[in-house]
Image: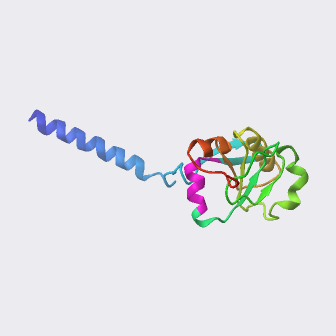
Amino acid sequence: MKMKSALLILMAGLLLLLAACAGQNAPPQNLATDGEKISVAGGSYTDVSVDGLQSMFTEKNFLLVNVHIPFEGNLPETDLSIRFDEIAQNLAQLPADKDAQIVLYCRSGNMSTQAARELVELGYTNVWNLAGGFNAWKAAGLPMADE
């Protein structure tokens, strides 16, 4: 009898857990490909891991921008180099569509984070930042474009 009661309690608990989860409409986030949303003034940008950026290269449909100064090399498939502290003065080089995906990187992630914040403040809605910059890329054993 005790075992039957324990089993019923366990099943009731599982049903409650399933019912609670079923009410959530948001799909689970895959940090490797979706990244982590970072809220800032005016919206948010997404931090993406090296693995996530690598998976994005399979169907590259984004602008990849190196914002590091001084120049120390590019990741493969880099489209532009724009100084992080001059990003607002170089909007003409970026897509006119502020919903277009733009991925920024620098050496460690600090300069690209600053540039990402500024682009979001300027109304860009699909800004991504390589977490850890090209230091993380190299630490993963991946080559730079000019190596």
Measured as percent of width and height from the top left, residue 91 is found at 86, 57
76 left or right of 20 in image: right
Furthest-left residue in this view: 1
**Is residue 56 one of those drawn in magenta?**
yes
Measured as percent of width and height from the top left, residue 48 is found at 61, 48
Furthest-top residue in this view: 2
The count of marks equals: 0
Measuring 24% from the left and 44% from the top, which residue is drawn there?
11
**Is residue 91 one of those drawn in magenta?**
no
Magenta-drawn stretch, dominant element (helix, strand or loop): helix
Measuring 51% from the left and 51% from the top, which residue is drawn there?
30
Residue 49, compared with residue 61, is above or below; it is above
130 left or right of 115 in image: left
Measuring 48% from the left and 52% from the top, which residue is drawn there?
28
26 left or right of 133 in image: left
Furthest-front residue in this view: 147
Magenta stretch: give its range.
47-57
Furthest-right residue in this view: 89
1 left or right of 10 in image: left
Q: Which quarter of the rendered picture does the N terminus lie within?
A: top left
Measuring 69% from the left and 60% from the top, which residue is drawn there?
77
Measured as percent of width and height from the top left, residue 31 is found at 54, 48
Measured as percent of width and height from the top left, residue 61 is found at 66, 65
